Each structure stands twice: as structure tokens, then as C-alpha cells.
Image: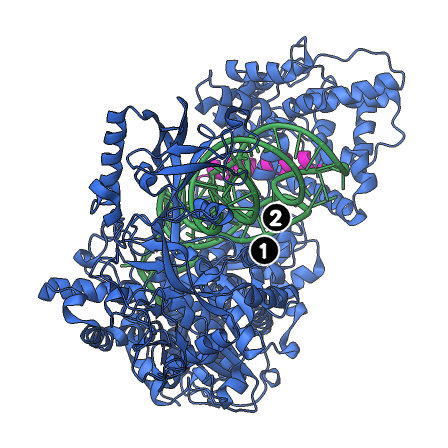
Amino acid sequence: MTDTTELSKAYEPSEVEARWYNVWLERDYFRAEATSTKPPFCIVLPPPNVTGSLHIGHALTATIQDILTRWKRMSGFNALWLPGTDHAGIATQMVVEKELKKSEGKSRHDLGREEFLKRVWTWKGKYGARIGEQHRYLGASLDWSRERFTMDEQSSAAVREVFVRLYEEGLMYRAQKLINWCPSCRTALSDLEVEHEEKAGTLWHIRYPVKGSDRSLTVATTRPETLVGDTAVAVHPDDPRYQGLVGQHVLLPLTDREIPIIADAELVNMEFGTGVVKVTPAHDFNDYQTGLRHKLPMLTILDDAARMSKDTGKYAGMDRFAARKAVLEDLQLLGLLEKEEPHKLNVGTCQRCATVVEPRLSPQWFVRIEPLAKPAIEAVEQGRTKFVPEAWTNTFFHWMRNIHDWCVSRQLWWGHQIPAYYCVACSPRQGDDTDLPLDAPTVKVGGVDFARAEPIVARSQPTACPKCGGAQFVQDPDVLDTWFSSGLWPFSTLGWPRETPELKTFYPTSVMETGHDIIFFWVARMMMMGLHFMKEVPFRTVYLHAMVRDEKGEKMSKTKGNVIDPLDVILGAKADALAPTLRNKFPQGMPAFGADALRFTLASLTQQGRDIKLSMDRLGGYKAFCNKLWNASRFALMNMGDFQLDDRPLSSRSLTLADRWILSRLQRATEEVRASLEVFGFAEAASTLYQFLWAEFCDWYIELAKGSLYGEDAAAKDTTRAVLVYCLDRILRLMHPFMPFITEEIWQKLPMTRPVASICIAAYPEPDAALVDPSAEAEMAPVVAAIEGLRTIRGESNLSPAAKVKAVVQSPDARTRELLERWRGYLMPLAGLSEVQVSPPGTKPAQAAAFVSGNLEIYVPLAGLVDLDAERERIKKEIARAEQEVAGVLRKLENPNFVAKAPPDVVEKDKARVEELQARKAKLQDHLQRIAPEPTMSETPASAMGSTEPITDSAQVKVSPEAKPAAGGVDLGQELKGELEAASTREPTAAAADPQVQEALHKLREGTKEGLSAADHHDLGVAYMSMGLVDDAMREFDRAKESGDAREAPAPKKAAPAKKKVSAEPKPAVAEAPAVAEPKRAAPAKKAAKAPAKKAAARKAGKPPAKKAAAKKAAKAPAKKVAAKKSSAKAPAKKSAAKKAAKAPAKKSAAKKAPAKKSAAKKAPAKKMSKAPAKKAVAKKVNRGKSPARTGKARR
RNA sequence: GGGCGGAUAGCUCAGCGGUAGAGCGUCGCCCUUACAAGGCGAGGGUCACAGGUUCAAUCCCUGUUCCGCCCA
């Protein structure tokens, strides 16, 4: 296809995304085969509420599942992602009822069951397609030919079959038990559908007179209105207060009943309240159990709407809360209300409508759960199903091991009606004396008393009553819990109970992917049902994703106004259509980010074990990423000419270094992405892709490719084109599962032959070992390092990119020089050079900016271009950083334990690091001196900062190294002093001048202190002290003494302030810093000298110097910039400030300041590059990190 | 009351024994003919607190404090 039509300049997601989905559908790419030679891969979509609309959580679900499905499909699997929707019993019924009320002012009872259900089906027909459409916007590659609904005929058949079989097996039973009841929804709820929350309530103390005695028992209760339903009061059998009362009776206030006093150790907590508990078995779960234990009568005093029943006398018909008030008033009048006190209590509320749930005694259907739970537990124990993240395994176990029988009947109309039938002829009838209200849904049907009638459970309505032969039946009016049918989803959707090829091919499914909030509701139940009916787990892996919250971590909800609608994100939205918090963020309306950006964002934020805070900023960043991909492709296509990629292997072309390098990097990226996907590492995979495309492919390869593309060499041009197309093809395929639309759009335009018509079914890239090219990656390193060095110089000198400069690059390494020479064609355009001279170290340009790293020295003559003062400042900073780091590393090396116990390679690395840093520092100092301003000052300005002589020509130095720094600058280097080498080369100070000290330091640098004499230790102590390293110094003095050197420890050199001063004036050094009596006081941090710090230091250091921690801390604070900044910024009196100042651990600050980049540099360039996670900036950093040459680069 | 997460740069998040990272935001220089949704450079961190283990702790252990969730 030479149809390389130009791409528009900016990526327009809406335009591109609108086009592809239908094409894919038409070509049936998402259709899975019932049987196939390919390995199966199957995910069933957690069915969303059929009349709902997708929220951002669904978008996450869809994104993850689509990534998995597309990836597997591209990897040669027979991939089935099966869509469906859920009838969502209560939710849907409520929505339709509400609508009915609104539009016609009618209740469902006005319509009757049949008519109402018709309305619900109409509603479903009207809105049921919405979910599907929304999934299409997201690009979800669902097999729509297999779409299912939990109430379609097949699913209903499965539900009936399961119900009947469970009944036949004795696992389904009907019983009158205390269940959770929502008085508003007027239905039973399962334990899971009740949400518990702590509320402020009241504990009332009520006196119950003891019969035949003056005595009374005071019960403490939070629910006085249920008093009229009490059938006992209970005390603890061991409670001395109530000995002898058990077996007697109390007179139940407000009634004429007498109820027994019972002893129950389980119910009663002696410590709580008065130790006397009223027992209302029909209205409290604990009391219910107590009632069973003691065979107490169970009086129901509330109806299905939680109104007081007919038997409650004057309270009859009152709402439970009104009744509470009335009862309390009456008790008050009788003088039986002793007191009330505030009390926190847990209240159960209806998950759906938030009404306070009422325990209610009623006939319901239950699933005997234990026999089902056991195999599910075992399956997970045996690893037949695995949870990802693994942490959910225990949650699963805990719940499964404490599970109760599942109440599955609901007093609703919308749902699977229970396949139980009652003979009209012989079933007991509802009497007139029922206490149930007339409009109770369970009562009205046929007049049969379902509470007492005997059910006939059957797959279809029976023809004759086995008892009386009657032929008229009514079906149980109740419907099943919605989760009952969802529990069958993994096999009911595949055709069960029929034995279908689908079932054979795809069961067990591969992955169950869903939010962790429904692990019990759904996952656990699918496990139980699947194992029971299919004899095998329903899925091999359960991947549970986190909840999506808003940017602030708040749950999204309409009332909070922070809901983010995925379609708004994809398509954009006018401001007035947005939720309030979003409107604030996008006053002009939300731009269309596109599905690809949304998907990539969600994938990138998906982290195990943490909620997702959806950041609009990151969303914007990933939209930019789409644009980047678009424009990189656009660039390539614009430069293709008539080129068409053929089948020749790339290696048959003469590849340039850049070609070999990017091809190698691509293989590694490919490998990493694949590895991440294998372990559900979506964020990691996304990061690798982001990184590779932006930081490596765009920032380096495309830039390097311009040389040949814009050149005259036709063959070279075509080679570059081939590599560009090859890379893009693979990048696009790697990315396709994440960003299906944009990848398809671009892929179609690549000038190459496509083995298949769509990227959807193209092969997922595999790494090509032949293209992995470590030597190319190594060769690129110095080139990259040099370019970056030059860019640093340019950037810090504020040189316009237009200004071409001349550069001198020196390296002692012949190979490096050769590479730079050979690839100067890369160097010059990318670094903006007019000329470059590569040579071994030698004469340096005079007025130049410098960049120094491990084996590279780069100079850019700046005279006339910029103010050299700035360059000097910069170099000083670099030196200071090097010094800081060296101090830190040396401290480590100086510890014999470290040297002895740490792995040799670690020690070696540190030693090498010290050498390198010192060499670097020397070069920088050398350079600094070279660009010194005309010697207007009497002191040598050149060495101002670092205070050390340039190593290279230290012999000739005649000036005091303690010379003052550039005007006004804080002499960091000097302050630091935590640098032994500096001490050793410094102009004689009290300590450092001593040859013995020199010797000791020398040994130190060698990484060992073995053989140090007592005097050595002492000298070392002096040296440390002169540098402000008090704790180190004190330790050395201690050692000296231990070894017999009787000399007293000298006072520490005056701390910080002195230093600062030193730096401000050309003072001949450090030596005579006034002694301070207590070493610990001398917190070296310059700020520490200030009042607050002092205080802190004193506090900390108040202990003997031997105290390791204190001493160490104080000593460490090598007057870091940080310390200074921090403490000065804070109120002096502030404790924290003091603390900080006192601490300012050299370690930390050193680490911080030091070569952040270095670490990167150290690593193999390849590695670094491949790793760096996120974005474009990434690119920048990454590059940096990778270049080995960069190793020595100053930390910035 | 029990359990599980989390606490790292201004914000959203990686990392998790050996020199602290990204994106966005910030600052500086650039409209360099793929991309200003961009390029180059820079600044920014007591890795919640306190102990402990270790040669070495952001990382492992213990405790504390906050935040979130689940279960009872």
C-alpha cells in the first residue's frame, strides 16, 4: 500500500476512533471459534447493569480485559471475550418504579405484576443497548455474537436447573429464619447487601420490675421500641449482682406480660451497660440465637414496612422511630426510664437505598453454603485458581470459612421467579387475621399462605399435586437474588446446561477480571457454583483491580459531584454537562482525550494494592503521548518517498550505528512488554512502551535518522526508511492492545506488505535475538554522553539552539575518540556544533565552558558568547557536588566493617567511584582556574570553591587554595569539607599539614585503615575535626586513646559560621578556627550555628561524644545547603527546625545532592534506557542515564 | 473489636537492602521544516514518626500516628 496519505498535523482521536470499530465488526475479528486448533483464551465480561451506563470503573474493567484479549488474540489464541448484561434486580426495579411514579403517578401494584414486568422489559429494550455502545467507544473487542443477558431464556433455564438440582441435593431449602429486611425495598437481603456503619445513638436504661419483689432489673438498650416484643431478660450466669434471680420473672413494662429472667453467658456481657439484656428474638440477631437456645417465643411486632403491628396496642401502625419516641415517653411517665447516655452503635443499612435494615422473621429460600464453600476453598488452596494480587487470597479464605447460608429469595418482581409451586387446592390459605398489611407482595397472590405451604420445586409447573392431585398451582412469587444468576455466568453463558462445544472449549475460563469490591458477591459465588456444577473451577486466575477514585482519592458519586464519565473523557463534553468538580477543572469544557488516551491512562495507573486516583493531568499527558506517536509516524511517512518495505532481512542492509542501536533497543522493549503482560503488569508494560517510543525512538533515533533522510545517499536513505517502518510496525503492534484505534490507523498507512488486513489480528511482536546488539548499545554510549554534555553546556549557558558552537572533546580512551570521530555526524547536528575537535587530553581552550565525565572532557569556547561568571558558578557547583559525594563514599570506605563485610564488588565500585569523582573534580578545578577572570583579586580566584588544587598541576600552585569564592557565592565546597582529598591537598592547616595525617588519609583512600597506629588515629581525628566531622573525629580519638596515644582531643574547628565567613573573605584558611570547648557543640552545619540549631545540636549532642547516634548526626551535617536552607527558613524557635539542623545528615544530603544522575550513568546505557518509565521527560533523563560516558557527569 | 492496604518531589504515581525515579506542574533558552499536545537544559525529596536487624535500610522487623477499605 503506497497509500501513505499524509497524516494531519495533530492527532484527532474522535475522527480516527469513529472509523475503526465498525470495520472491525464487519470483518468479524472479535468472533471466537467454538472449536479451534488454537489454544483457547476466554474472559467473560462482568455483566454491567443492563439499564445503567458505564462509569469509569467499567472503563477500567474494559481496558484491562481488552488488553488481555487483544494481546492473546494477537498471540495466536482463540480469544473469546464474552459480553453480557445483568438484570440487576432491585436496582432496575427501583428505576422503573420511580419512572412509573413520575410519569404516570402509579405504583407497580397499580399495574400488577405482569404489566409491570412488561414495562421493565420495555425499559430494558430501550436502554439495554447503551452499555454495548459505550463499550464500542472504548474499543472493547467483545464477541458480540455471543452477547448474553442474565434473564434471557438460556440463562433462565440454567437458573431453574441449578435451583432444582440444589433443592434435590438438599442444598436449597425454605425456612422461616431471621433475615435482613429492608423496610423500604420491602425485601429480604443477603448479609452482603447490608452495609454496616457506625452511628451515634443512645443507650437507654429501663427498669423492669421483678415480679413479686420490690426489686427491679435495669436493662440497657438501644432499641426501646422493641420492648413490647421482649420475651425474656437475660443476665450473665456468673454475675454476682443478679444471683438468685434467674428463673424468676419480670413484669414487662407497657404490657401485661410476664417474661422470664434467663441466664445466658453468650448473649450477656457483664461489663456492658447494666449487665441485663432484654431479649427480643424476632428483632435482633443475637436475641434470635438466644431465643433458639432457650426456646423463647418469638414475637414479631413490626410489619414489612417496619411499622408497629396490630398486636402492639396503642403503638399499632406507628413507624418504628415514632414508636421509639412514644415508648420512651410512656416509660418516662411510669418512672421506669432510669437514664440515657450517648452510645455508638453499628447500624446496618440497605446497600441499595440506605434505609436502616430491620431483622425480620420470615420464610425465605436459603442455599446451604458449607458444602459449596469447602471445595472452593480447596481449589484455591491447591492453586487451581490464583488471585492476583495474591493478597486477596487470604481475604477470600477468611470470608469463605466464615460464610453463612445464603438467603437467595427476594420479594421483588423483576428477576428469576423461584421455580417452586404451591397447590392451590391443598395449601394453607392466608387467613384474615394476618398481621401482614394488605399490600404485602408475598401475601396477595392467590391467597396461599406461603409461610406455611409446602413447595413443589420443579423445572416447570407440575401438572398434578402429588398430595391431592390438584391441577392448579401458584408459583412462588419471590425472585432470586441477582447474584444467583451471576454466579452461574462463566458456564451459563457458554451454553450450560447443554453440553456445547463452547463449554468444552472455553471452560474453565482463563481470567476473571473484576473489581475487588465484588470478590464475595460474585467471585466467591462463581467459584462455588462452578465447582459444584462443572466439577472444575470457573477460571484459572482472578485478577482483581482497584477502585477508581477522583484525583483527591474521593469515591466518585453523584452527590459529591465528582463523577467522571468515560464517554465525556473520550468524546469531550461541554462545561455545563460536567460534574461540578470537573467543571472547575475545565471551565471551557472537557477536551476529547480519546479512548486510546483514556485506556493508556487507566493501564498506567493500575497498580496492585492501591486505589486508582484518576489524574486529569496524566490523562492529558497520555493524550500528548498519542500525539507523539502520531507525529513520529507522520514524520516517517513524510519521508518515505516511494519506499516500500520488502521482506529482505534488515541485517542484509548496511545498518548504521543508530539503526543497530534502535533495533537492539526495540528487541529489549519487546521482551519487557511481553514479560510485563504475562504477570498482569499493565502499568509496567505501558511505561516501557511510553519510554521506548518517546525517549528512545523519537528523541534519539528519529533525530539521528534525519541525517540520512535528508542526505543524498539513496541507499542510506532506504535503509533508514526500512528501519523506521520496521520499528513503527512493531511499536504499533506492541501498543495495539493498549491503544487499538490510533495503532490501527497508523499501521494501515505504513509502506509495507501486511500479512493480515488489520493490526487486530496481526502477530504480537516477538523479540528477534539476532537484532539484539550490545556492542551497538555500547558504541552509542559515548556519542550520547558527548551530546548530552554539550547540551548541558548549552542549556546552562542559555545558548540559543540556533547558535552553532565549536567544541573540543578530549578523551584518554582511544576507542572513545575513535567512536566520536566516526560518529561526528551524529554529534554535530544534535549538539548544535559548527565544528568538533576530538583529541586526547591536552591543551584546553582558554575561555570555555566545560563538561567533564568519566573519560570525556568537553569544552566549548564561550568567550564572547556568554558571561563566564555564570560558567564559573556552574563549575563550582559541580565541584561542590563531587566533593559532597566523595565525602559520603569515603565515609563508607573508611568503615572497616564495610570493607570487610560488604561484597567485594560493592566495595570496588565505591573505590572506583571515589577515584572517578576525584579525577573529575580535579579536571573541573583545573578548568575553573583556566577560566578565571583576570586576576584582579589578590587571591587566586580559580580555586575558590573547591579549595583544592587542581590535581594536574598541584605542584605548581602557589596560591592558597582557601581563596575566596566568586563574589557573593556561598562557598559550598569549603563548607563541605567533608572531603578527605581536599584536606590532603589543602594548604597546610593544623591538621592536614601533618605528614602523618597525610599518610593516614592516604591509607584511608586506599580503602583500609589497617595498620594505623595510635598516632595515626589521632591525626586522622585531627583531620576529621578540621573538616567538621565531629563524630568521626571523636571516634578516631577514642581509638587513638585505646591504642595508647594520650594526647587530648583538640577542639573541633569552628563550625559553620566560620566557614561561611571564610568563604566570604579571603582568609588564609581553616587552620586557626577558634577552638570550641565541646566538640559536639560544633555542629558543622553552618546553620547549626544559629540559635535554633544550636539548641537542637546541644540537645542531641548533649550526650557524650561516644554516643554514636548523636555524634554521628551532628558530625554529619556537613553544612549542606539543605541544612542551611531549611533551618533558615524555619522559625528559629521551631523545634522541628532545630531538629533538622541538628540532623542534617551528611548521608542524606550528600546522597541527595550528589549525582543523581550518576547512578543512571553507571548502568549500562541500554538498561537504563529501556527501563525508564514514563514519558518524554523520561526520555531526557533516560538518555542521560544510559550513557556510560556520563558516568562522571556532575550531578545536577 | 479483627483483618488488609497505603503514607516517596507542589500534584498523580513507580521503585523496595548497596549513589532516590517518571509524568504533570515550576524555572531558563528555543516557534530547529514530525510534534509548542513540542525541543533542550535546570530546580525540586528528614522516602510519615520512633526503635531494631545489618558493614549498609526508603526498602526487612517491631511499635506509633494518620488515610482508605473489608469483616464482625
Instruction: Residue type at mark 1: give it.
Output: Asn
Task: Return the mark for residue A1158.
Answer: 2
Which picture quadrant has residue A749? bottom left
Q: Position of residue A535 (x, y in %)?
A: 58, 77
Drawing shade for chain A: blue
First in residue order: circle 1 vs circle 2 = 1
Which picture quadrant has residue A212? top left
Task: Pick whichever, A664 or A315, lies toward us.
Answer: A315
Image quarter where the N terminus of chain A lies is bottom left
Q: Residue at x 60, y 54 (%)?
A: A809
Task: Pick whichever, A960 or A782, lies toward us.
Answer: A782
Q: Magenta stretch: give its range.
A: A867-889
Q: Which residue is drawn at 62% across and 38% down?
A: A882
User: On screen, A401 above or below A741?
Assistant: above
Q: Which of marks 1 and 2 is in front?
A: 1
Q: What chain letter is assigned to the residue under label 2?
A: A
Instruction: Residue type at mark 2: give it.
Output: Lys
On screen, residue A1027 versus residue A644, left or right, reads right
